[in-house]
Amino acid sequence: EVSAIPVLSRKKRNLLGLVVVMHDITQLKKLEQMRKDFVANVSHELRTPITSIKGFAETLIDGAKDDPDSLNMFLNIILEESNRIQSLVQDLLDLSKIEQNTTLPKERISLTEIGGYAINAVLNSAEKKDIHIINQIENDVFAYGDKDKITQVLINLLSNAISYSSSSSEVILSIKDEGDSQVISVQDKGLGIEKHEMKRIFERFYRVDKARSRDSGGTGLGLSITKHIVEAHHGQINVESTVGEGSTFTVRLFNA
Ligand code: ADP
């Protein structure tokens, strides 16, 4: 955008010249649009479960509470929808913290130990779908990083691998040391991701299939948080995928 400011003489009668000011507002406009989209997305994601909670509570008050089956079913829905709001708020807090604080406290952490912990954390949801998690974690793999955040990365990737696989499938977690870097990979034999969606899945609130993501308790923020954490560690995250065959998410952390 170019704007011209007139420069007048002291007595403001004669125009002495023009000062031309050039602003590059495309970047600012983009950021502003992203902020607006973000607020719109958050509002939408919150409104849906709140509307549902209100609706079921009203129905209960209007008489459904006298029927034990309805009472039980509606209370369970209210609880589920409250859990959804809680996860969303938790993810938003995580995202905002990680965005503000790009230098993380780093200590020597055992990826071997974190890998085992993350498998345990998702075991229940894997068992529910009869998904077998194959542990290919090398012994004594160490990295420098924030233990809680790297644990979150592993849990996020494993949870997605489980959510986007069909029943009786398998998920492989491999962790290895390659000398100057450590490589974590989570491989599933699930739905896979179309090529044009691969970049977008790391965006906040982007989901390939909204309904499926919601059903699995997803907020659409997991991969965005994961990518931020990896980048705050100066690491890399990649995805390789074939529709109908499955996906592999690879995280590489560097020593230096
Ligand atoms: P969500 O909470 O929806 O899982 P994420 O940010 O973790 O949000 O992932 C964004 C989208 O990327 C998901 O909605 C899903 O469409 C896709 N996705 C993520 N992981 C996988 C995977 N392992 N296989 C197939 N699709 C995936």
Image (spheres, rainbow, N blue to C red):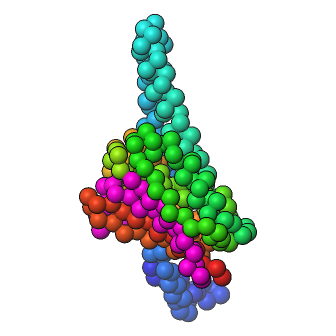
Q: Residue 159 location in percent, x, y?
A: 47, 51
Tell me residue 52's x, y (percent). Answer: 43, 30
Give the total number of marks visible in the rendering.
0
Q: Which corner quadrant of the image does residue 87 belong to?
A: top right
Q: Residue furthest front?
A: 139
> From the viewer's perspective, is residue 112 above or below residue 47?
below
Residue extending farthest left: 244
Q: Residue at x 46, y 56 (%)?
A: 134
Is 74 magenta? The answer is no
Q: Is residue 187 visible from the viewing direction of this image? A: yes
**Farthest residue, direction top:** 66
| Relative height, residue 7 to residue 60 (above, below) | below
User: Seen in the image, is 126 located left or right of residue 230?
Assistant: left
Q: Residue at x 57, y 40 (%)?
A: 86
Q: Please report the bounds of the magenta region as a residue range.
A: 170-198
Of residue 224 and residue 190, the one placed in the foreground of this image is: 190
Q: Position of residue 96 (x, y in %)?
A: 61, 57
**Quarter residue 225 falls in:** bottom right
Q: Which quadrant of the figure contains the N terminus?
A: bottom left
Q: Is residue 58 visible?
A: no
Tell whether position 173 is magenta.
Answer: yes
